[in-house]
Amino acid sequence: MLTDALDIIGIGLLLTATALAVLGVVSFLRLPDLYSRIHAANMVITGGAVPLFLALLFLADSRTGLKALATAAFLLVTTPLVTHVLARTAYRRGVDLGPVAARDDLAAASPGGTRGPAPSTGGGPGPGTSAEDT
Amino acid sequence: MTTTVTACLVILIACMGACIYRIARGPDALDRLLAFDLLGVLLSASFALIALREGAWHYLEISLGLAILAFVGTVAVAHYIERGRLF
């Protein structure tokens, strides 16, 4: 009976992981700019891959489950690092903020600009007009 | 249970196809890099599902290795794109 309960928990985690991975990949395909896509990819990994390895913790024997737990912990630690490095590189390279970005707080905070060569051509108001909003 | 695991595996492989589409089409190099990282992690998750389906538990080590390779490769290529050199 305990084994049945563990199986049910594991299969529930497996289905949750697959549903979140599908949601994240669909938004990864459809979101308009790179920064939003980084967010969607982060959701695929933390919401899709990590629960899948946790499901293996419930469905396999204990030694295998510990290996799966190690993989899940590794993914959980390294995903924010990858996301941060990608977003910083994109900002310094001057990747466009996209049509949904309202303002650029980092450019307003550093007047010299850490931004790359390509200027922002987003639809929202520039950093000069953003002081009125706050 | 085998049916559920197989269905999840097929869905994850379809997700990997979507990542390959983004690699082919992505407007920036960083889009391609992000899709590559996502492809590696989804491949690692698929190997875990294959291990669960076949009962071949040593496949989990392939899974851990793919996760490590995706992380190290993505960070190295992102640094290369940002600075023009690796170190």
Image (cartoon, helix red, strand yellow):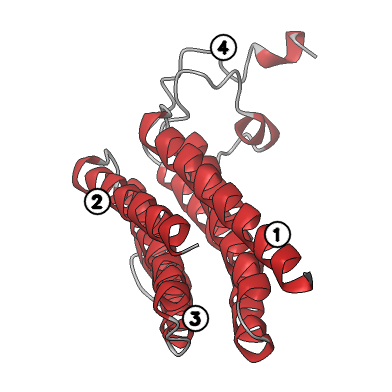
Using the image, tell me which numbered label, if any, was put on residue A9.
1
Which element type, helix, strand or loop, lies under badge 3?
A: helix
Marks 3 and 2 on same chain: yes
Using the image, tell me which numbered label, if any, was put on residue A125.
4
Using the image, tell me which numbered label, if any, was put on residue B20.
2
Marks 3 and 4 on same chain: no
Q: Eyeballing the image, is B87 above or below A49?
A: below
Expressed as whole percent of the image width and height from the top left, the position of residue A76 reads 65, 65
Q: Eyeballing the image, is B62 above or below B46?
A: below
Judged left or right of residue A118, residue A133 is right
Which element type, helix, strand or loop, lies under badge 4?
A: loop
Marks 4 and 2 on same chain: no
User: Of residues A115 and A41, which is closer to you in this image?
Assistant: A41
Q: Eyeballing the image, is B46 above or below B22?
A: below
Rendering quarter of residue A20: top right
Residue bearing mark 3 = B64
**Are circles 4 and 2 on residues that touch, CB within 8 Å?**
no
Marks 3/1: CA–CA distance: 23 Å
Expressed as whole percent of the image width and height from the top left, the position of residue B71 reads 47, 71
Q: Residues within 10 Å of mark 3 (few under 14, many from 20)?
A: many
Judged left or right of residue B76, residue A132 is right
Amino acid residing under circle 3: Leu
Amino acid residing under circle 4: Pro
Marks 2/1: CA–CA distance: 32 Å
User: Of residues A134 and B63, which is closer to you in this image?
Assistant: B63
Amino acid residing under circle 2: Ile
Which element type, helix, strand or loop, lies under badge 1?
A: helix
Q: Quadrant of the N terminus of chain A?
A: bottom right
**Are circles 3 and 2 on residues that touch, CB within 8 Å?**
no
Expressed as whole percent of the image width and height from the top left, the position of residue A98 reads 45, 25
Marks 1 and 4 on same chain: yes
